Image (spheres, rainbow, N blue to C red):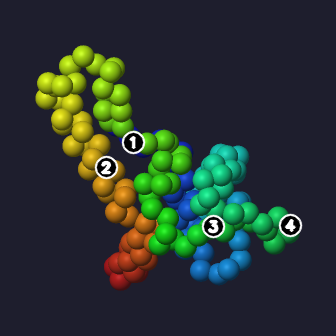
Amino acid sequence: MKLSTRTRYGIRALLELAENTGDSPLQIKVIGKKQDISIKYLEQLMSILKGGGFVRSLCGSKGGYLLAKEAKDIKLIDVFNCLEGPFVTVECLADKSLCSRTSDCVTRKVWFKVQKAVNEVLESMSLQDLVEQAKEQRELNYQI
């Protein structure tokens, strides 16, 4: 199980916007350069994130992207669901009718625990948490 590029890059792009302390929007080329994401792919991601209500765009020479709400109000689970859809470890957790063994399957219980743990982590973290972790990491690296 691994996260798609869409989710990893999408969250990195949001983090870049969240760390932009000014009120001015960031141009997509700036986000792409800082996060090493191709402009073409980033345009697709920003369109999805805009549709999900996470970013807003401003047109014109001073245009670009801003967060649509405060970083503390953006839960990683919501971003993940926007970019990937709900996290399901095995299909029988979403639809019991897909397998005749669901009522007595021991492994299904394991996959449920894994799914629950991942969802709890994503639910417990906001974009602001990532901003603070990034700041701490930079300070740690600076001290070395």
Q: Is residue 38 visible?
A: no
Residue indicated by mark 1: 87
* Front residue of this view, candidates 134 and 109: 109
Q: Is residue 41 visible?
A: yes
Side (left or right) of 33 relative to 117: right
* Front residue of this view, candidates 80 and 28: 80
Q: Earlier in the sequence, mark 2 or mark 3?
A: 3
Q: Position of residue 132 (x, y in %)?
A: 41, 75
The span from disc 4 to disc 1 (Cα, nearest Å) is 37 Å
Q: Position of residue 43 (x, y in %)?
A: 70, 50
Q: Report the mark closest to the observer, 3 or 4.
A: 3
Q: In the picture shown, does residue 88 fall above or below 57?
A: above
How many residues crowd mark 2 within 10 Å: few (<14), some (14–19), many (20+)?
some
The span from disc 1 to disc 2 (Cα, nearest Å) is 8 Å
How many residues crowd mark 3 within 10 Å: few (<14), some (14–19), many (20+)?
some
The span from disc 2 to disc 4 (Cα, nearest Å) is 40 Å
Q: Secondary structure at mark 3?
A: loop
How many residues crowd mark 1 within 10 Å: few (<14), some (14–19), many (20+)?
some
The span from disc 3 to disc 1 (Cα, nearest Å) is 24 Å
Picture residue at 22% right of the left edge, 24% below the top? 102
Q: Amino acid at mark 3?
A: Ala
* Quadrant of res 125: bottom left
Q: In the picture shown, does residue 15 fall above or below 119?
A: below
Residue indicated by mark 4: 60
Q: Secondary structure at mark 1?
A: loop
The span from disc 2 to disc 3 (Cα, nearest Å) is 25 Å
